[in-house]
Amino acid sequence: MTSLTRRNALGLFACAALAASARAAAPLPGDSVYQLHPRLVDQDGRPFDWGSTRGEPVLASMFYTSCEMVCPLIFESIRRTVDAFDKPVRDRVRVVMVSFDPERDTVAVLKETAARHHCDGRWSLVRGSAADARRIAALLGIQYRRLPSGEFNHSSVISLLDAEGRIARRTSTVGDVDPALVAAAKSV
Amino acid sequence: MRRARTGALAAALATACAIAPGADYAPLPGGEFTSALPQGATPGTTAVARVAPFQLRTTPVTRAEFRAFLALHPAWRRGQAPAVFADAAYLADGPAADDRPDVADARPVTEVSWFAAQAFCESEGARLPTWLEWEFAAAADETRADARSDPAWRQRILSWYAQPATATPQDVGGPPDLHGVRDLHGLVWEWVDDFNALFVAGDSRNQGDPDTLRFCGAGAISMADRDNYAVLMRVALLSSLSAPDTLRTLGFRCARPATGEPR
Amino acid sequence: MELQSLRGALQRTRAFLGLAAIAFVAAPALAANAPAGTGDFGPPRGEPIHAVLTSPPLVPPPIHRNYPAHVIVELEVVEKTMQISEGVNYTFWTFGGTVPGSFIRVRQGDTVEFHLKNDPANKMAHNIDLHGVTGPGGGAASSFTAPGHESKFTFKALNEGIYVYHCATAPVGMHIANGMYGLILVEPPQGMPKVDHEYYVMQGDFYTGGKYREKGDQPFDMEKAIDERPTYVLFNGAEGALTGDKALKAKVGETVRLFVGNGGPNLVSSFHVIGAIFDEVRFEGGTNVQKNVQTTLIPAGGAAIAKFRTHVPGSYVMVDHSIFRAFNKGALAILKVEGQPDKSIYSGKELDSVYLGDRSRPNLEAVTKATESARQGTLTLQDQVKAGEALFTGTCSVCHQANGAGIPGVFPPLAKSDYLAADLPRTIGIPLRGLTGKVTVNGTQYDSVMPPMSQLNDDEVANILTFVLNSWGNPGGQVSADDVKKSRAQGAASTAAAAH
């Protein structure tokens, strides 16, 4: 609280709360991924409300920490994509990464992964049950399969969700920034 | 007043009890199994997988059973389930929650999405079988646990694929196989838990040429046993689907761990 | 200092000239009509066009357009049961409801927006690989479609030619064997020379559980397909698809262009039209043309364009010249050419009965009816005349002609024949024992050989004779199977039988 007076701060808070509750009151569209209510926990061990990012644009994907090849690239792609956004979008965008290996991706592992990839406050690395992971993958159109060795076969898809949780754009481009994704974020 | 209350109670009991009967599970021993989908560490190679013992519903879930589920779970009725969980054709041909409960309908329920199937299985303390569990169960015939090398087994399955889809399928309750499970072939396609992980790309001909970046560990795309086209067809169909999709020829059955009990 | 600037100026000028030269060379490439072979004529122009698709054997009309366009193609997959042969049902998987699938026609350089729809009543997922597409899987990777869904992908038709398309969903061989193939024509930018008729013919091999012509519902047989032992080899998906009243048609003196494909899945075709020579064949559907070709090889998953001009009327039989396929598996189609004969080119008889035997008869119902009536004892004169007419065609008409006129100096007429009318028992004996040597009919002498028609049974002879007696000014009358039987029993009489 630097230049904000207490009254201003309270006013702002009230506005934000009103806006949030207004949005919460408005029904979710039928094709919103927030229709799902998985029980998730983030890298700090706090319960993560899947629908809490409603109102902001979201970049969502899935990963597992033991992945050597592609998953680091997914993190990198998302980071570069966020950097490529216009400032208004960059300020609002959130990133949600869901693990499909909750057995090995404990909260501690998630925390360590977040640190390794220099994830800032807009990133949430989350884990839930195996069933929830499967459901989220079904929503985001991500394929994954556990091999007996413990490795996973999986596709790499980054989804851009609009403020209502609808998939506005998906990309399989990994390693590079997808200009179509950046363009789509402008109108989200 | 009292009579009405008793009547309501009876009705509630009737619908509640409607779930439990008919939920007939058969135990399957599990064991070592060579899947048609490569399970090996090296791309494209098979490795023998271990299937833990499990229980499988003896028939696909019927329309009568699904109707009872809809009565207790209105969120899953046609028109209630959001588009992200079920497409526009979901239950287009019924059953509906308000059908008369005494009308027994033993046909397998179809036009259900993966999400709806999951919800049903969870409602009876079960889940969808994994592909491996389904394939393991489906390899059996009346006398053998693994009949897949028998051309007659393949031909029987193939001839169902060759017939065009009829309007709605026949009743469940075909002859049981070695494990006591019925109707795994010849009735409807069935959802599995990891239907979207079967990794037959839209064009499955370039088997040895994986797009490594698109699929982590992508070498495992190829089908290990190309001769087993009976399995190939099933994998192809499931791979073409998304979770909210429904088909007139696609139903499901549930599975649960070996020691599970119905609620 | 001056040298520097001079050198600099020279360099700049050289650079400028270089650029100009490049621009000069590049300009034609960028212009509308790029040199043949590049196929990329730039972005599409004008309003989007909905492609006209046709069912075989018809072909969409030629394209009259001199610019690349955005063309929208919508193709639906339908799984349906149809007859593969008389009384034999097979479940086909089809593009557009037919085997082969709809014919697609675009122009080189077009941007094609392809929609693949999978009927919700279908059981299987399908996709499409068009051999005219440059891109992964020929489109197959981008068109994998579940029942009740539609996929869309876009490609530019870079190469002109005639290309096969087919489903490529696992197991691919089965999808193809069930009929999922067709042709897409990418016209060269200047169009194709005008012809009078264009037709679409596509060969395929089929594998059923039962034997050839075994009646009833027949399933696909994967073992036979893997062993490459087809039950049927057919043009356009069914026996008789292009024969009888469904034969292709042309007139004398017209040019015919055949787009001939081979969907396989296994066999290579030795495509030949009996009695015709291909003036030009774009073999393998490529750009080069071979001339004066009798038989052309069409690979499985390939196509060719054959062009020829008709000169003489008749029925021209298209076959796979691996000839057992034509006569024992059904690889047979007909082009019927009508018009004035030209004896200087060909003097002779009709071709069809020689090659086809019983296949040329489109309608054996009358014969069946007559046989049934005879068995029940209700046979009428009309039944016999109708049955006799059906049998006459293809057996007697070969020599005596369909109108009974015969061939002057060679074969005596049956029309208003005094010879036939004079002695009925003698007449009955003729089909049985043949007739050789000098006879005088209607005042003209003939000295020819008619072999005994030993393939005909008593009913058939009776019906044919009844028909003849009641046609073309003959006196009428009725011959019964009993009459024929008696004549047969009297044995070889004065007429000696000669080998045919």
Image (spheres, coloured by chain):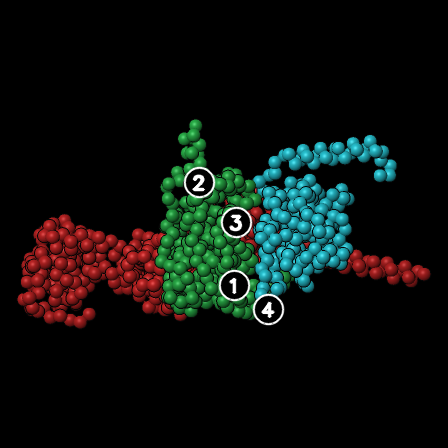
Chain colours: A cyan, B green, C red
Residue type (three-letter) at the residue carrying disc 3: Glu
Label 1 close to label 4 by CB (< 8 Å):
no
Q: Are marks 1 and 4 on the same chain?
A: yes
Mark 3 secondary-structure assignment: helix
In the image, is residue A13 above or below residue C105? above
Q: Give how far apart the Cα atoms at labels 2 and 4 are.
A: 52 Å
Disc 4 marks a residue whose amino acid type is: Ala
Q: Residues within 10 Å of mark 2 (few under 14, many from 20)?
A: few
- Identify residue type, mark 2: Leu
Answer with mark 4 or mark 3, whichever residue precedes in sequence.
Answer: 4
User: How far apart are the two marked residues, 1 and 3, measured between alpha carbons?
Assistant: 20 Å
Query: What is the C-alpha distance between the residues marked 1 and 4?
Result: 20 Å
Q: What residue did someone put label 4 on?
A: B41
Marks 2 and 3, the one that precedes in the sequence: 2
Q: Nearer the viewer, mark 2 or mark 1?
A: 2
Frontmost of labels 4 and 3 is 3
Q: Which residue is mark 3?
A: B122
Say which residue label 1 marks. Answer: B52
Q: Chain of mark 1?
A: B
For the residues labelled 2 and 3, the Cα–Cα distance comes to: 20 Å
2 and 3 marks in contact (CB < 8 Å): no
Q: Secondary structure at mark 1?
A: loop
Q: Residues within 10 Å of mark 4 (few under 14, many from 20)?
A: some
- Say left or right for C378 vs C403: left
Q: Nearer the viewer, residue B144 or C256?
A: B144
